[in-house]
Amino acid sequence: MNSTHPRMSPLLHNGDSFPELTVQALGGGRLSLPGDLAVSFGVVLLYRGSWCPYCVAQLSAFARAEAALAELGIKVVALSADDEGAAAAFAAKHKIAFPIGYGADVDRIAAATGAYVNDQPRYLQATGFVLDPAGKVLTAVYSSLAIGRLAADDVIGFVRYVRSQR
């Protein structure tokens, strides 16, 4: 089993501002967070890579829930250390329409978010954040290995609850 590198920075907590992150985006341009999610509830999914069956299941579930997420004004983005070719093939095969970032600098993203890192090969462990429209963390889910991650249905229910309390 591959070792998991300890978090390089503190966890992001509820109410913290999500850090400024920029990665290359499929289709050209850059994915800039949290700015690209401004004025919407946002979901940021750090995934291990296109090869991970748990990541495939998670991102596919978010893709299937696209209409329900959009109805609540929830934007989803995902990013990994995959190269452009692997990320593009992954998005096409699994019909992922939300923005995908690729070539993420593992150490920089981990330092900014507190995500766990796998040492060999080097990649981010699954980590998910739900952000409010101002870019503040509403909840964060950190996984130190393959399992334990945000689920689309849970995000939909959670955002419905948060909206009902405002």
Image: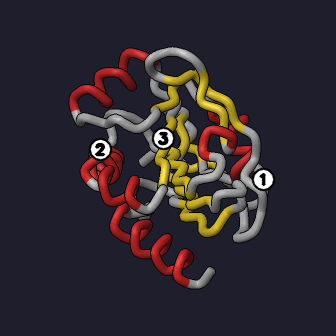
Q: CA distance from mark 1 to mark 3?
A: 21 Å
Q: Quadrant of residue 37?
A: top right
Q: Quadrant of residue 132?
A: bottom right
Q: CA distance from mark 3 to mark 2?
A: 12 Å
Circle 2 sits in a helix, a strand or a loop, which is it?
helix
Circle 1 sits in a helix, a strand or a loop, which is it?
loop
| Amino acid type of the residue tagged 3 in the rendering | Ala
Quarter in which the C terminus is drawn: bottom right
Return the disc, 1 or 3, that comes first in the chain's sequence.
1
**What residue would you read off at disc 3?**
78
**What residue would you read off at disc 1?**
9
| Residue nearer the viewer, 138 or 164 | 164
* Residue 56 circle label: 2
Question: In the image, what residue occupies the spot 48% across and 41% down?
Answer: 78
Circle 3 sits in a helix, a strand or a loop, which is it?
strand
Question: In the image, what residue occupies the spot 72% across and 52% down?
Answer: 18
Question: In the image, what residue occupies the spot 29% across and 22% down?
Answer: 89
Circle 3 residues within 10 Å: few <14, some 14–19, many ≥20: many
